[in-house]
């Protein structure tokens, strides 16, 4: 239970590690492997109930015609929805479109998905953010059931949609919104169910509505993915205009029974509370933290402990943001030369500005070219380049990009009309990449404690990935 195992490569090999797991793994591998964490122990109830109130929910087609609706409170006339589309079109023409529209005392809170409008009506001053969260969750549940949520899938599944709307909300308040739990008793073969078996699972009335009882696995394991996306904007003279890190911690849970988990991070506030802050203990300051509903928020507010009873299978435990100055991980320099209205030559230099033992995989550098360019020719020191005329870009693909390395790409195009390029302007260069075994913020999973009344042994594993988000460098 106190030992840790390190997944190297197939076949698996284990070795003892300390509580702090470094990102050390062979840099040349494609897919990041999980590493074993120390398994310890936690404690908790469920999160506080959310409050909101919606009178009715409508699903409209692209012309505003109601396809299906559910009246939860009866305090708003269902005919009020007829005012929604004229009001929407009027606001759109005025250039004052907003996610909340009002007609008299009735408020319409709406979102658009594909060719559908989902609209909630209310007379009260409801908690708008929670109403929108509910509408997006409804889209997520319907998408789980029908794969693609669009007008045709609603028309083909009226009975299931009505059943789901009944379970998702009651008297204007959200109820069961977990698609895994809903699929236990609302199925697309509902008419084939035997009446004796169509009972509501205990999870619906449970305090822990996101997890069923009686789950069993031969091998109990938890896989933790720490994924950070780097958003970066650099201007033409090389100054960083915007940089931030958006992180998520995702779990794959294969645990029997009703386990309680506690996750420990190198959170700066936690270190200060426990007296661990100092030069030896590197910590990060998390901002805009958002948790899955299973996390006990009162416990986190009190002592920064992330404790929870997890759903079964895959889910996103938390997300966070760090608005910190990030050194560009892949630096791009470009030179564009024009020759007498006949051709243009582009030279791009890419440099990996991360640790030498790390490797960026699947690197794609998108270099914009004039829309009237033709006859492309390329020369690269590594990887391959291709012209994508429908997007007016050259995509330079590098399968494996080690830290500290520098590579060149030259492109030559015929150019019938150079003048047009000046009118078009010059879009920025975009970069995509993924670096395994590495987090740019330095966040670490210090431990994962697992406790279940049967006392079984469970194995927690972790892996770290840094990837590009909105990563752009402007050209001169």
Image (spheres, rainbow, N blue to C red):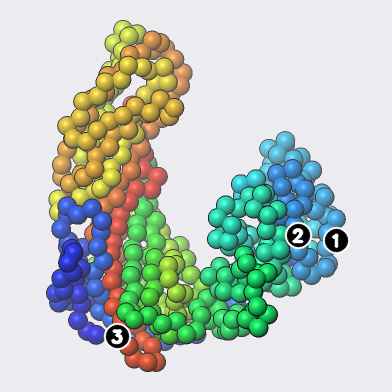
Which quadrant of the figure has residue 331?
top left
Residue at position x 77%, y 48% in the image: 65
- Contact between labelled residues 3 and 1, with CB atoms less than 8 Å apart: no
Nearer to me, 360 or 420: 360
Q: Position of residue 25 (x, y in %)?
A: 17, 61
Q: Position of residue 8 (x, y in %)?
A: 17, 65
Residue 77: mark: 1
- Contact between labelled residues 2 and 1, with CB atoms less than 8 Å apart: no
Residue at position x 21%, y 63% in the image: 23
Left of 170 or right of it: where is 475? left
Q: Please name the residue that numbered disc 3 is placed on.
A: 457
Nearest to viewer (mark 1 / mark 3): 3
Q: Position of residue 39 (x, y in %)?
A: 28, 81
Which quadrant of the figure has residue 131?
bottom right
- Evaluate whether residue 236 shows in this view: no
CA–CA distance in space, label 2 to label 3: 48 Å
Q: Please name the residue that numbered disc 2 is placed on.
A: 69
CA–CA distance in space, label 1 to label 3: 57 Å
Using a 10 Å C-alpha cutoff, classify the residue at mark 1 as few (fewer than 14 neighbours), some (14 to 19) or many (20 or more).
few
Looking at the image, is mark 1 or mark 2 earlier in the sequence? 2
Left of 32 or right of it: where is 286? right
Residue at position x 85%, y 55% in the image: 79
Looking at the image, is mark 1 or mark 3 earlier in the sequence? 1
Determine whether the residue tagged by mark 3 lies in a helix, strand or loop: loop
Which quadrant of the figure has residue 222?
bottom left
Furthest residue toward top:
340
- Evaluate whether residue 122 shows in this view: yes
Nearest to viewer (mark 1 / mark 2): 2
């Amino acid at each position: 239970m106190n030992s840790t195992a390190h997944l190297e490569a197939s076949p698996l090999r284990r070795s003892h590690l300390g509580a702090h797991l470094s990102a050390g793994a062979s840099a040349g591998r494609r897919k990041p492997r999980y590493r074993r964490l120390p398994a310890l122990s936690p404690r908790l109830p469920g999160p506080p109930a959310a409050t909101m109130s919606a009178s009715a929910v409508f699903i409209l087609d692209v012309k505003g015609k109601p396809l299906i609706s559910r009246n939860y409170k009866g305090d708003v006339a269902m005919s009020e929805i007829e005012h929604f589309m004229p009001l929407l079109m009027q606001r759109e023409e005025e250039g004052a479109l907003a996610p909340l529209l009002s007609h008299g005392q009735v408020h319409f809170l709406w979102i658009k998905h594909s060719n559908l409008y989902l609209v909630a009506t209310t007379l009260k001053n409801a908690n708008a953010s929670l109403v929108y969260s509910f509408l997006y969750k409804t889209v997520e549940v319907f998408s789980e059931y029908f794969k693609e949520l669009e007008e045709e899938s609603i028309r083909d599944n009226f009975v299931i949609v009505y059943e789901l709307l009944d379970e998702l909300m009651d008297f204007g308040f959200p109820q069961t919104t977990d698609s895994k739990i809903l699929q236990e008793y609302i199925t697309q073969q509902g008419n084939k169910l035997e009446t004796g078996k169509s009972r509501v699972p205990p999870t619906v009335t449970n305090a822990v509505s996101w997890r069923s009882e009686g789950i069993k696995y031969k091998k109990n394991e938890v896989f933790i993915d720490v994924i950070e996306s780097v958003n970066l904007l650099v201007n033409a003279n090389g100054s960083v205009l915007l940089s931030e890190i958006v992180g998520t911690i995702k779990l794959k849970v294969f645990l029997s029974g009703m386990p309680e988990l506690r996750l420990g991070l190198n959170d700066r506030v936690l270190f200060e509370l426990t007296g661990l802050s100092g030069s030896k203990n590197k910590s990060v300051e998390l901002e805009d933290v958002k948790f899955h509903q299973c996390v006990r928020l009162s416990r986190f507010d009190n002592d920064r402990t992330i404790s929870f009873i997890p759903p079964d299978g895959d889910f996103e435990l938390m997300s966070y943001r760090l608005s910190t100055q990030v050194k560009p991980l892949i630096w791009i320099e470009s030179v564009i030369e024009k020759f007498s209205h006949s051709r243009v030559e582009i030279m791009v230099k890419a440099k990996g500005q991360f640790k030498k033992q790390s490797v960026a995989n699947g690197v794609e550098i998108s270099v914009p070219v004039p829309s009237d360019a033709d006859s492309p020719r390329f020369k690269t020191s590594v990887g391959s380049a291709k012209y994508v005329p429908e997007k007016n870009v050259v995509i330079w693909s590098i399968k494996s990009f080690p830290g500290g390395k520098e590579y060149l790409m030259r492109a030559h195009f015929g150019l019938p009309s150079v003048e047009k390029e000046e009118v078009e302007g010059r879009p920025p260069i975009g970069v995509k990449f993924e670096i395994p075994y590495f987090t740019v913020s330095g966040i670490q999973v210090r431990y994962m404690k697992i406790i279940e009344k049967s006392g079984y042994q469970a194995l927690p594993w972790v892996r770290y990935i840094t990837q590009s988000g909105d990563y752009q460098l402007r050209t001169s």
